Image: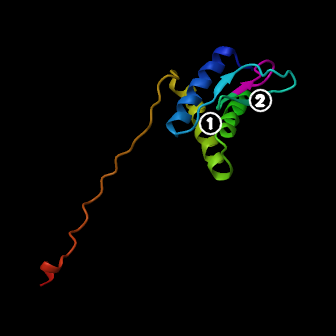
Amino acid sequence: MGMTSLDFGTAARSLARAAHLRGLVVPVFASPPSRPDLHRSIRRRNGSPVVSIRLGDRPRGAVLSDMIEGIVVANYLEDSKADLVRSALWLAIDGEGDQGDASTLTLRTEVVETAPAPPVPTKAAAA
């Protein structure tokens, strides 16, 4: 099951939104790469990263993985920071199908009520 250019555009918008919310540089996504022997390439034009990805005859997961890795590389992320960003970006993509409308992002928030802290004794109260 491949990815259409429409799917590619939707994924690019979702990933861009998730990257932007995390304060990351959002690359331009394009297809295909200029070199026919590559599945993914990244270059910088006037300081802005451009990630080009081949769509044809490739599984959707491979294309999404290349898009996510393009964001990681464009932001020079390494080690645990890169892993954290990869996980967050996969969640942004995986959440699309559950919501039906990829243009909305719903975050679950829980309110936890706690008892007020007891008053702290002061020197005046001790005297």
Q: Position of residue 62 (x, y in %)?
A: 75, 30
User: In the rendered structure, which amino acid carries the disc numbered 1?
Assistant: Trp
Q: Decide which of 2, 23 is in the foreground and name it.
A: 23
Which quadrant of the figure has residue 87? top right
Task: Specify whether 58 is left or right of 74.
Answer: right
Dot 2 amino acid type: Ser
Q: Secondary structure at mark 1?
A: helix
Percent x, y for residue 72? 66, 40
Other residues around mark 1 within 10 Å, as few (<14) / some (14–19) / many (≥20): some
Which residue corresponds to the image point at 87% horizontal and 25% vertical from the top-left?
A: 37
The segment highlighted magenta reads: 51-60
Location of residue 126 (image quadrant) = bottom left
Query: What residue lies at 44% left-to-right and 36% top-to-bottom?
Result: 107
Quadrant in which the C terminus appears: bottom left
| SS label for mark 2 | strand
Queried whether the magenta region covers residue 56, the answer comes back as: yes
The first of marks 2 and 1 along the sequence is: 2
Instruction: For residue 51, say whether it is visible.
Output: yes
Q: Which mark is residue 41?
A: 2
The label nearer to you, 2 versus 1, is: 2
- Where residue 80 sits in the image (x, y, percent)? 64, 52
The single residue placed furthest to the front in the displayed view is 46
Q: Are marks 2 and 1 in contact (CB under 8 Å)?
A: no
Q: Residues within 10 Å of mark 2 (few under 14, many from 20)?
A: some
Magenta span: predominant SS is loop
Q: Residue at (58%, 35%) from the top-left corner?
A: 25
Q: Is residue 33 above or below residue 23?
A: above
Q: Which residue is mark 1?
A: 90
User: Is residue 60 in view from this perspective?
Assistant: no
Answer above or below: position of 17 versus 116. above
Question: What's the distance in space between the residues labelled 2 and 1, CA to CA?
Answer: 20 Å
